[in-house]
């Protein structure tokens, strides 16, 4: 199964949703799309507008490939699950976002060798086709959270201030 998520951003991401529905028409693999505010009737893929957090985690876990929009929180969740996400950023020029921060951030993550970054949606099918060999070259564990270290450091600062 391929799981596609466009997150909960209020602007639609029809370009990705429609692309993956068309991809599903030509391939014998289930495609489940969390479409958010994208108003699109799929003919071949399964679409759900929103999913509870537990169901999202289950979909990520069960999917052979997870394709996400360019929201770093979304693909970081895929990385924490030990998978290499395929990241397709929203673009300002298509009216999918108010600026191109998803492209800028995605390029930085790509440099860390832990995501498959697809700026040109016309190459998405090729990335899916070669996912196994491409993802072997990357390390999803290279993206780890510094939250625990940050909180410990902050606690020390607060403790010192309160003395």
Image: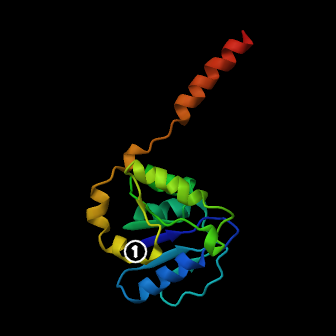
- Left or right of 100: which side holds 135? left
Expressed as whole percent of the image width and height from the top left, the position of residue 53 reads 59, 59
Instruction: Please state, as top left, top right, bottom left or bottom right, where the N terminus lies in the image.
Output: bottom left
Nearer-the-camera pick, 1 or 126: 126
In the rendered image, which residue does mark 1 sit on? Answer: 123
User: Element at badge 1?
Assistant: helix
Please say whether residue 64 is visible from this viewpoint.
yes
Please say whether residue 63 is visible from this viewpoint.
no
Kindly indicate the quadrant of the structure image that contains residue 34: bottom right
- Left or right of 31: which side holds 158? right
Residue 163, above or below 95: above
- Left or right of 133: which side holds 74? right
Would you call the spot at circle 1 few (<14 residues within 10 Å), some (14-19), or many (20 or more)?
few
- State the residue at coordinates (46%, 56%): 78
- State the residue at coordinates (49%, 81%): 19
- State the residue at coordinates (65%, 65%): 8
* Residue found farthest to the front: 93
* Residue found farthest to the right: 162
- State the residue at coordinates (63%, 68%): 92
* Residue found farthest to the top: 163
Instruction: Please state, as top left, top right, bottom left or bottom right, where the C terminus lies in the image.
Output: top right
Nearer-the-camera pick, 92 or 46: 92
Kindly indicate the quadrant of the structure image that contains residue 74: bottom right
Expressed as whole percent of the image width and height from the top left, the position of residue 150 reads 57, 30
Color encoding of the figure: rainbow
Residue 16, above or below 68: below
Expressed as whole percent of the image width and height from the top left, the position of residue 65 reads 39, 67
Expressed as whole percent of the image width and height from the top left, the position of residue 21 reads 49, 84
Residue 143, above or below 84: above
């Amino acid at each position: 199964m391929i799981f596609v998520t466009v997150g909960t951003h209020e602007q639609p991401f029809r370009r990705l949703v429609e692309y993956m529905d068309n991809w599903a028409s030509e391939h014998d693999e289930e495609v489940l799309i969390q479409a958010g505010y994208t108003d699109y009737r799929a003919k071949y893929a399964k679409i759900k507008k929103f999913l509870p957090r537990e169901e999202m985690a289950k979909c990520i876990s069960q999917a052979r490939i997870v394709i996400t929009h360019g929201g770093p929180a979304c693909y970081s969740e895929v990385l924490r699950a030990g998978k290499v996400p395929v990241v397709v950023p929203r673009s300002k020029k298509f009216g999918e976002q108010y600026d191109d921060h998803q492209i800028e951030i995605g390029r930085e993550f790509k440099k860390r060798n832990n995501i498959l970054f697809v700026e040109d949606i016309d190459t998405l099918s090729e990335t899916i086709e070669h996912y196994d060999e491409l993802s072997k070259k990357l390390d999803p564990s290279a993206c780890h959270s510094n939250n625990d270290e940050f909180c410990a450091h902050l606690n020390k600062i607060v403790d010192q201030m309160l003395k």
